[in-house]
Image: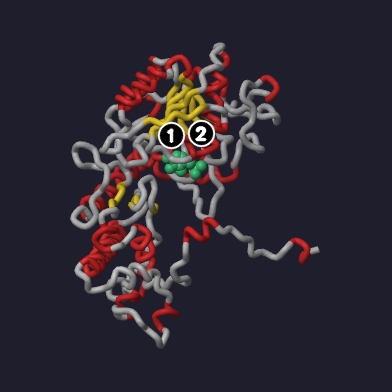
Amino acid sequence: YAGISLQPNAGSQGEYAGLLAIRGWHASRGESHRNICLIPSSAHGTNPASAQMVGLQVVVTKCDENGNVDMADLKAKCEQHSANLAAVMITYPSTHGVFETTVKELCALVHQHGGRVYVDGANMNALVGVAAPGEFGGDVSHLNLHKTFCIPHGGGGPGVGPVCVVEDLVPFLPGHGRGAEPGGVCDTPASAHAVGAVSAAPLGNAAVLPISWMYIRMMGADGLKHATEAAILSANYISKRLADHYPTLYASANGHVAHECILDLRQLKETSGVMAEDVAKRLMDYGFHAPTLSFPVANTLMVEPTESETLEELDRFIDAMIAIREEVRRIEKGEWPQDDNPLKNAPHTADSLMNADWPHPYGRDVGAASQSTRAHAKYWPPVGRIDNVYGDRNLFCSCVPVSELA
Ligand SMILES: *Cc1c(COP(=O)(O)O)cnc(C)c1O
């Protein structure tokens, strides 16, 4: 890519800025009527949200049974909307955890119809040092420094979502009323600028950028490439070792995944009444924060180990997942009822396990998963099962009213 703006404070803001650049570019050529944005159904929710925010009309395109963009459908929609096509947003490798082999053709097709290609860079963990979106046809991408480049983002921030563009889109990167910055990062006064600012500070969350800078410097080019390779290897290791217990939903033709794998738990509902959420909660008893639940496919777990976990930690996770699958088998065999078993009652607090009254058909040690977790590392969940859906639908504030502080 030829230019970059550090202004966006999140990947989603990078998308917003990148789509503004695309709109600005179309407008500069007298083509502001181009307002269609094609987005495959496998996309992250921020993609359609950002497109809506810049005033584009979202048209969703299909995925095939392997999780890839359905090229026939994309082609049909490119043709149908050719005169008004503004952009296509794709994620590579996709949110389904596969490297789509048709990505180059896809980019060329969109260009043929006058649209620009937004490659969502949230999965750069599978690309750094190995492939570059600008090389295979992307026009704009954001990076998520808080995903790929080490900025800690537990608890919601701070994020940095730099947006990168090809040469002819550089003039449409965010500007800022605060004026020139040495180094040319945002050197266009807002008044003269086609797009304007996307965040309050000219360089966004500048104070956390040294973290990414240090990471890159310390890893070096070889180290970064190695991290990518380890991330891909780790995901494939998990996918293969768990294959007999939980099939991986999407893989490429050679059976491999990219940097993440979607474990398909959907068949368990019929055989045991167990849902992915029960497995997620049970993992807490085994000392794990669950992987991504029910995204992008309902009732699955998406595991993205990254390069950060040791082989020992990967094995600990895999062993816990296998042990949980064995528990599901006992439900399948009828040893435990579908509504009273270690999965449905997970997570188990110390309090609930020590209660004099223990009405369940399995032992307290089973509930605690104490046989399967290393005693010195046993994690005790502080809160039992809550009703997530109820919580999501009934938001209430438990802070002191402002009047109390007056
Ligand atoms: C995380 C993510 C985003 C959004 O990034 P934020 O920094 O959370 O706004 C967009 N697309 C994909 C594929 C992602 O995984």
Q: Quadrant of the N terminus?
A: top left
User: Could you tell which of marks 1 and 2 lies nearer the N-terminus?
Assistant: 2
Tag 2 residue: 15
Q: Residues within 10 Å of mark 1 (few under 14, many from 20)?
A: many
Residue 302 at what x, y percent from top left?
34, 50
Label 1 SS? strand
The residue at the point 54 percent across, 14 percent down is 31
Tag 1 residue: 120
- Is residue 60 visible in the rendered image? The answer is yes
Q: Is mark 2 within 8 Å of ligand 1?
A: yes
The residue most toward the top is 30
Q: Is mark 1 within 8 Å of ligand 1?
A: yes
Label 2 SS? helix
Residue 46 at what x, y percent from top left?
49, 39
Specify whether 15 is left or right of 113.
right
Marks 1 & 2, CB-CB < 8 Å contact: yes
Quick one: 326 or 222, which is closer to the camera? Answer: 326
Quick one: 197 or 24, which is closer to the camera? Answer: 24
Q: Is residue 67 above or below residue 234?
A: above
Residue 30 at what x, y percent from top left?
56, 11
The residue most toward the bottom is 356
The residue at the point 57 percent across, 20 percent down is 24
Residue 232 at what x, y percent from top left?
29, 44
- Is residue 216 visible in the rendered image? The answer is no
Q: Residues within 10 Å of mark 2 (few under 14, many from 20)?
A: many
